Image (cartoon, rainbow, N blue to C red):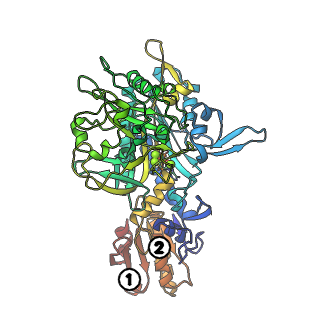
């Protein structure tokens, strides 16, 4: 196809928009891809929509390749399913809530686990129907506290979200692996540098979870990696020091032997006993949302577990039974821990235990039972959830709680070398949800023996609009956008310069020939615009190849320039189509 600059709905700007902080945001607005409608809410212009469509195309192809089927849910959703899953409450202020004319509560979907679970429950009932993978590409709504960087963090944004449904854990593993592989292909094709890091599961619950981060100084996530291949979001390695539990009023706990293989119940019992002996008031430390625990069995095998704590202040640990979900963490034994004093700080003090091990490492419960504990996210005194929990800033410490930062040069938890810190943009997230939503919403199927079993799920997201910004951010230079071919709005930017009618005729003809050869051409056919302005626009818009028909035409030549490298060459007009296709 051919688009003409004379009629294309675009106005390039020479000045940066006042509200823009990040380079991609400035350039996407200046080059006429997007336009702000309200904070965190953007209108997509023709150029922007074309890039978005390319990203969506890549995502659709890779989803189809793993057999995932596309559906489309409404954005406007009823409260009930989110009430059942508790996310109506958990999402807090991030949820856009509305009322219909009958005063019923509704919301704008922030993510769709509940709806997908109910849909499958509605339609399927047998193990023979599974495995199943469904996805949609749809606008999501989150009232982000700090919408920033334009479409990088919007309050309305497009996400590809998919969900897998399996009858057993092995099936979930396989579905997860397929999705992870598909994401590798998607992000390879999008053409930016990314890392796959261990992540915490946060509000989603569930176990294994990894993020795909685009490596970028503009990112809001910090991750660590080691030469030996360890990579994790710092959220997943940051430890907090719940010293509040080690003060004088802390529960006078003692550790009892746990005979046999420790179970979640035995761990809970330890905690229950410890807390029951105390009439100490609850502190911020108690409202930490997830405690990650690695259990070690007597035979030496380890079992990572997470205990999710509700966000309110009068936590009754007993209430937590049934809410436990395993979360993958690095197994860490005594010896390993000794090498990482900064992680050791995250352990509940000996007062809870009544014991300190010979190595000086403090254990949550019996040292033979628990080898690791990490506090990952927390809540402030008002029960409001934060991440990056910082004492004094996010809550008033009761006792002392401090974040033990992971530092550059620290040894990786798996001993694979010194950690380096870098920033990244979260582009995709894969979760093994497990049975949390299926259980809450009653998604069961009959297994081979005619027994009802609860389905196990995965959830997988790609930030589609965010990807547009991330690709822009990762490829731009100081003169403008510089799209990789896979997502560029056009393949070729054809510029006609000069006043000579012959130039415009030749350019017009070339545009037609390139179009016939399957090339999408953006043709700058504006008759009264100076060459300088045209070149500036071409550089700003960032189509990968810029072809100029101008002065050289007298000798039968045109100029071909690579937008990214700036390399130029003269080629004969007669060879142009062969050369450019
Ligand atoms: P973040 O940590 O950046 O807030 P998230 O962990 O809340 O993201 P998920 O719930 O994992 O996001 O959603 C899946 C994907 O959707 C993310 O990996 C990201 O690419 C994208 N995404 C999430 N929030 C936004 C947003 N506000 N604007 C644009 N894309 C977003
Ligand atoms: Mg978020
Ligand atoms: Mg995140
Ligand atoms: Mg995420």
Residue annotated with mark 2: 540
Q: Nearer the viewer, residue 531 or 547?
A: 531
Residue 25 has which mark?
Answer: none
Residue 107, percent across and down?
65, 42
Q: Could you tell me how far apart the alpha carbons at marks 2 and 1 are, in whole angstroms?
A: 28 Å
Q: Quadrant of residue 376?
A: top left
Vertical arrangement, residue 392 with respect to residue 280, above or below: below
Residue 286, percent across and down?
47, 37
Q: Nearer the viewer, residue 176 or 526?
A: 176
Is residue 246 in view from this perspective? yes
Q: Nearer the viewer, mark 2 or mark 1?
A: 2
Is residue 506 in view from this perspective? no
- Tell me how many marks there are: 2
Crowding near the residue tagged with mark 1, few <14, some 14–19, many ≥20 C-alpha atoms within 10 Å: some
Residue 371, percent across and down?
29, 33
Residue 316, percent across and down?
52, 28
Q: Is residue 103 left or right of residue 522?
A: right
Crowding near the residue tagged with mark 2, few <14, some 14–19, many ≥20 C-alpha atoms within 10 Å: many
Question: What secondary structure is found at the residue carrying circle 1?
Answer: loop
Q: Residue at x 39, y 49 (%)?
A: 403
Q: Nearer the viewer, residue 190 or 232?
A: 232
Vertical arrangement, residue 313 with respect to residue 125, above or below: below
Q: Which residue appears farthest toward the top when viewing the image?
A: 449
Question: What secondary structure is found at the residue carrying circle 2?
Answer: helix
Q: Is residue 417 left or right of residue 503?
A: left
Residue annotated with mark 1: 556
Q: Residue at x 39, y 85 (%)?
A: 552
Vertical arrangement, residue 200 with respect to residue 483, above or below: above
């Amino acid at each position: 196809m051919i688009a003409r600059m004379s009629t294309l709905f675009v106005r390039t700007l020479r000045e940066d928009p006042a509200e823009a902080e990040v380079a991609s945001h400035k350039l996407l607005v200046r080059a006429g891809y997007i336009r702000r409608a309200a904070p965190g809410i953007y209108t997509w212009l023709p150029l922007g929509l074309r890039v978005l469509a390319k990203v969506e195309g890549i995502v659709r192809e890779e989803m189809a390749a793993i057999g995932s089927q596309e559906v489309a849910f409404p954005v406007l959703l009823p409260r009930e399913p989110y009430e059942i899953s508790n996310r109506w409450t958990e999402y807090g202020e991030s949820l856009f809530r509305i009322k219909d004319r009958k005063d019923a509560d509704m919301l704008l979907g922030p993510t769709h686990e509940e709806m997908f679970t109910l849909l499958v429950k509605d339609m399927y009932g047998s193990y023979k129907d599974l495995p199943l993978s469904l996805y949609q590409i749809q606008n999501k709504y989150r009232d982000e506290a700090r919408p920033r960087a334009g479409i990088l963090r919007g309050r309305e944004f497009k996400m590809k979200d998919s969900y897998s449904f399996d009858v057993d854990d092995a099936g979930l593993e396989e579905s997860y692996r397929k999705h992870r592989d598909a994401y590798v292909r998607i992000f390879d094709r999008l053409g930016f540098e990314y890392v796959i890091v261990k992540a915490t599961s946060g509000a989603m619950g569930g176990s294994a979870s990894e993020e795909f981060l685009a490596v970028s100084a503009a990112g809001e996530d910090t991750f660590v990696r080691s030469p030996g291949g360890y990579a994790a979001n710092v959220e997943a390695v940051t430890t907090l020091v719940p010293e509040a539990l080690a003060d004088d009023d802390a529960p006078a706990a003692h550790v009892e032997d746990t005979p046999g293989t420790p179970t979640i119940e035995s761990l809970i019992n330890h905690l229950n006993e410890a807390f029951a002996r105390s009439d100490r008031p609850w502190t911020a430390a108690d409202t930490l949302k997830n405690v990650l625990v690695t259990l070690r069995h007597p035979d030496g095998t380890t079992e990572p577990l997470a205990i999710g704590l509700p966000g309110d202040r009068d936590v009754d640990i007993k209430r937590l039974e049934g809410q436990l979900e395993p979360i993958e963490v690095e197994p860490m034994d005594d010896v390993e821990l000794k090498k990482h004093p900064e992680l050791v700080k995250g352990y509940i003090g000996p007062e809870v235990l009544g014991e300190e091990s010979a190595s000086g490492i403090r254990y949550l419960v019996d040292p033979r039972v628990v080898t690791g504990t990490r506090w990952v996210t927390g809540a402030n005194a008002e029960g409001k959830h934060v991440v990056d929990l910082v004492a004094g800033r996010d809550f008033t410490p009761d006792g002392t709680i401090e974040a033990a930062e992971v530092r550059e040069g620290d040894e990786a938890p798996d001993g694979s070398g010194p950690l380096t810190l870098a920033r990244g943009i979260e582009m995709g997230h894969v979760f093994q949800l497990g049975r949390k939503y299926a259980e809450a919403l009653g998604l069961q199927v009959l297994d081979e023996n005619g027994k009802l079993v609860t389905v196990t799920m995965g959830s997988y997201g790609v930030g589609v609009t965010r990807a547009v910004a991330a690709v822009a951010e990762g490829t731009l230079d100081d003169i403008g956008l510089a799209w990789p071919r896979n997502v560029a709005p056009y393949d070729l930017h054809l510029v006609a310069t000069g006043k000579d009618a012959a130039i415009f005729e030749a350019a017009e003809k070339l545009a037609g020939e390139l179009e016939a050869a399957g090339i999408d051409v953006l043709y700058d056919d504006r008759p009264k615009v100076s060459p300088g302005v045209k070149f500036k626009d071409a550089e700003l818009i960032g189509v990968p190849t810029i072809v100029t028909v101008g002065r050289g035409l007298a000798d039968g030549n045109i100029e071909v320039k690579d937008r990214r490298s700036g390399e130029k060459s003269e080629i004969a007009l007669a060879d142009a189509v062969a050369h450019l296709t």
